[in-house]
Image: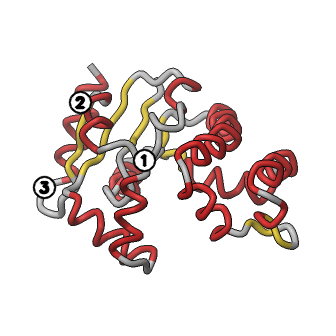
Amino acid sequence: MKIAITGGIGSGKSFVCKHLAKRGIEVFDCDKSAKRLMRSSLSLQDSLKNLVGEDVYCDGRLQKAVLAQFILSSNENKQAVNDIVHPAVAADFIRSGLSWLESAILFESGFYKRVDFDHIVCVTAPESIRIERIMQRDNISEAKARQWIARQMPQEEVLRRSDFEIVNDGSRDIDAQIQMVLKTIEK
């Protein structure tokens, strides 16, 4: 069985995954895989250089600010980067042998088409909480946090495409919600 956990930036997917880990459920982290592959895969690096420009790498190191500026400049650029990185991440997930996967952009990237998921769990949070989390985590302005949120599929649409919702608003019991999801999946 393959299960995806998704939700917009700042929704608290990683927090939910930590709760799953406490239950012995290991979750494949797409972001970590993408970062590792962008550091280690020469073919991926060549593809990104061809797309973004040679300055996306300096002395073999990914220049995150250059890549972020490219991604944020247009939806076409964002999709072009996804089309390079996500097939490699999907293959990495399949090789991992894990059943659970975390991806912030499961639908936007087309990742859900690359792997046949049995269930999709959407982690949600109010936008004000998401903005605060992003600002604190990444040490960025509210405007930049809003820009990142705006570049993703609206939370309501992600939820509509998902099978389950876990609300991570700081007041609802995450473990109880996870237990409900697990009970339903096991049936």
Identity of the residue furthest to the left in this view: 171
Residue 172's label in the rendered image is 3
* Circles 1 and 3: CB atoms closer than 8 Å: no
How busy is the neighbourhood of tag 3: few (under 14 within 10 Å), some, or many (20 plus)? few
Circle 2 or circle 3, nearest the eye: 3
Q: Which residue is at a point 79% across and 69% down the rendered structure image?
A: 61
Circle 1 or circle 3, nearest the eye: 3
* Circles 2 and 3: CB atoms closer than 8 Å: no
Q: Which residue is at a point 15% across and 54% down the rendered structure image?
A: 173
Residue at the spot of label 2? 183
**Residue 10 is at least partly visible in this image:** yes
Q: Which residue is at a point 48% across and 45% down the rendered structure image?
A: 27
Dividing the picture into quadrants, the one containing residue 4 is top left
Instruction: Return the residue nearer the eye: 14 or 109.
Output: 109
Residue at the spot of label 1? 24
Q: Of label 2 and label 3, which has the lower sequence position?
A: 3
Dividing the picture into quadrants, the one containing residue 114 is top right
The C terminus, quarter of image? top left
Dividing the picture into quadrants, the one containing residue 107 is top left
The x and y percentages for residue 81 are 65, 46
Type of the residue with mark 2? Lys
Q: Rounded to the nearest whole Å, what is the CA distance between mark 2 and mark 3?
A: 18 Å
